[in-house]
Image (cartoon, rainbow, N blue to C red):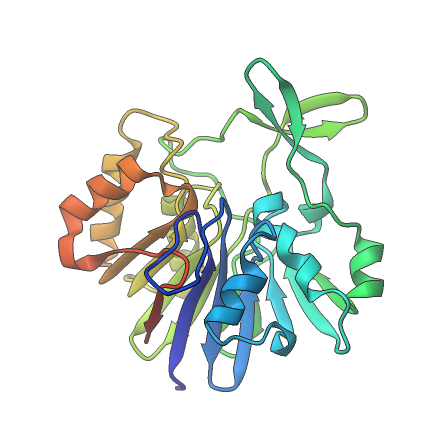
Amino acid sequence: MEKTKITILCENTAGIEMGIIGEHGFSALIEQGDRKILMDTGQGLGLENNSRFLGIDLGQMETIILSHGHYDHTGGLKYLIPSDRAREVYCHPDIFTPKYVIKPGIGEIFIGTGFTLEQLESDMKARFHFLKEFTQVSENIFFSGEIPRQTEFEKNDTRLLVKKGQDFIEDPLLDDASILIETESGPVILTGCAHSGIVNIMNHFAEKTGHKKFHAVIGGTHLGFLGSENQLEKTMDAFDRYELDLIAVSHCTGAKAAAICYNRFKDRFAFANAGWSVNF
């Protein structure tokens, strides 16, 4: 199996690399052999800048995976437009659903993908693969598809809405997807926001692959928006149950939850900030 490298290109906090900037959003580059796969693109503030400072050529990205249809994961697509090469894009079909968030005192604010399918197909030469099921998208890389919500302590964020006709309803976020990467060190789960619940995600990949343990979980965990009082403790217990060697959190994990995780896991923990990378 070929070596695997994961680099965080966009995240709320900048790492120590000179010139890297932070933003509310997430993007990660997966390099495995000569394959370069981009998962999410941030909101478009830091992708181009951070890629340049890290010596990464966005023009080489032929495969893009989108975890869900929020602006802070899709906005950077504009830096892949126009393109002189075709790009394969893997995502759930709900990625273009109009998405909103309730802001107290303001009301509903649009937070969806700021592009149309037609625009991306034309300007970015994108070929979209809409997936609802667990699917292999590249050698050793698997797209989760829809993730069953089975834990009682991981709940939907009720502030997040979709527009249906003239009405707003709670967003079921069926488009929330993660990926599993088979590496020399073991299976690695890479998440965007984990709206489905990070434990649901681990359980789903365990069921689909037969893995009883994972080497690492990297990315957003949505633990900054706890749906129940004991969610964080039960999540950390699940990290131990799956014998994680690395818990590298980003984005919507939140500072408080990240600090609690650090104090429990110590050397097994990392802040996966913009500019951070890891080799497997």
Q: Position of 165 compared to 269: left or right?
A: right
Is residue 185 depicted above or below 98 in this figure? below
Query: Furthest residue to the top?
Result: 105
Residue 35 appears in which quarter of the rendering?
bottom right
Is residue 94 depicted above or below 170 in this figure? below
Q: In the image, residue 151 lies at what x, y percent?
A: 38, 37
For the residue pair 118 and 55, the one nearer the viewer reads as 55
Q: How many numbered marks appear?
A: 0
For the residue pair 137 and 257, the one nearer the viewer reads as 257
Residue 280 appears in which quarter of the rendering?
bottom left
Is residue 167 depicted above or below 71 in this figure? above
Query: Furthest residue to the front?
Result: 19
Q: In the image, residue 106 lies at what x, y percent?
A: 62, 17
Q: Position of 237 compared to 47: left or right?
A: left
Residue 216 in sight from this viewpoint? yes
Q: In the image, residue 202 lies at what x, y percent?
A: 37, 53
Query: What residue is drawn where x is 39% and y is 86%?
Result: 1
Residue 81 appears in which quarter of the rendering?
bottom right
Residue 131 in sight from this viewpoint? no
Query: What residue is drawn where x is 49% and y is 51%?
Result: 192
Q: Position of 280 compared to 115: left or right?
A: left
For the residue pair 240 and 117, the one nearer the viewer reads as 117
Q: In the image, residue 172 lies at what x, y percent?
A: 59, 34
